[in-house]
Image: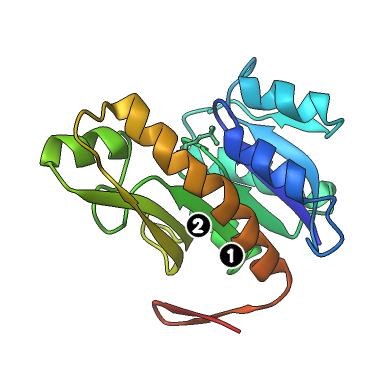
Amino acid sequence: MRVAVLVSGSGTNLQALLEVAPQPDSGYEVVLVISDRERVKALERAADAAIPTKVVPWSGDRAGFTTAICDAAEAAGARVLVLAGFMRVLGAEAIRRFPERIVNIHPSLLPAFPGTGAVAQALAYGVKVSGVTVHFVDEEVDHGPIIAQEAVPVLPGDTEQILHARIQETEHWLYPEVVKALVGGRLQVMGRSVLWR
Ligand code: GRF
């Protein structure tokens, strides 16, 4: 299945997805990388892997921005949108056009610490365990049905950077596993619950 990956920054999750895609059992191919920002590292990674890229700058108009992204993804034949460090909120049209086919990864155990700065929020709160959540995207931020969660310990002396690096180690194996399950038709959404088959 063809997927588009949406990015805004460094793209280490994109890299992990690109590394798994050629494996015979992956079931997916990254056909387009869409960024809302120019000159980010994620775009370089896509170019290095010879994956087409498209920059859709944030226009301040959510509806127009969303249409442009959906049109670009569809034109590339993508049936799934994988948000990997994408820092914008898509409008309702995206959820209509890609129903149960948009996923996001977030560096905390939702519903704790949604939004930006999740790792810093967790540290400031003093939690002993944080982690990774992969969820379907709905119209609210970091809110849709949860597909997978993995706990990551918070250790004495952790800085935001150290903890985020530990969380990302988990992200990099978990996200490809979820995308494989999604494209393989192994995820069933029942209300807020997602069943793995
Ligand atoms: C990840 O930690 C992800 O959970 C969050 O943004 C970060 C993106 O990192 N949504 P990268 O661009 O994939 O390196």
Using the image, determine if residue 175 lies above or below residue 165.
below
Q: Residue furthest front?
A: 156
Q: Position of residue 184 (x, y in %)?
A: 73, 73
Q: Is residue 71 visible?
A: no
Q: Position of residue 156 (x, y in %)?
A: 19, 34
What residue lies at 74% left-to-right and 53% top-to-bottom?
Answer: 3
Image marks 1 and 2: residues in contact by CB distance under 8 Å: yes
Mark 2 vs ligand 1: CB below 8 Å: no
Query: By what rule are the colours in the image chosen?
Result: rainbow
Using the image, determine if residue 175 lies above or below residue 147.
above
96, 184: nearer the viewer: 184
Q: Position of residue 181 (x, y in %)?
A: 65, 69
Q: Is residue 140 left or right of residue 83?
A: left
Mark 1 vs ligand 1: CB below 8 Å: no
What residue lies at 59% left-to-right and 51% top-to-bottom?
Answer: 173
**Residue under label 2:** 92
Q: Position of residue 4 (x, y in %)?
A: 72, 47
Q: Is residue 70 visible?
A: yes
Give SS at disc 1.
helix
User: Callout 1: 10 Å neighbours few (<14), some, many (20+)?
Assistant: few
Quarter of the image with the N terminus in it: bottom right
Q: Splitting the image into 4 quarters, where does residue 47 fall?
A: top right
Q: Which mark is residue 96?
A: 1
Using the image, determine if residue 187 lies above or below residue 29.
below
Q: Identify which amino acid the numbered label 1 is placed on.
A: Arg
39, 74: nearer the viewer: 39
What residue lies at 31% left-to-right and 56% top-to-bottom?
Answer: 109
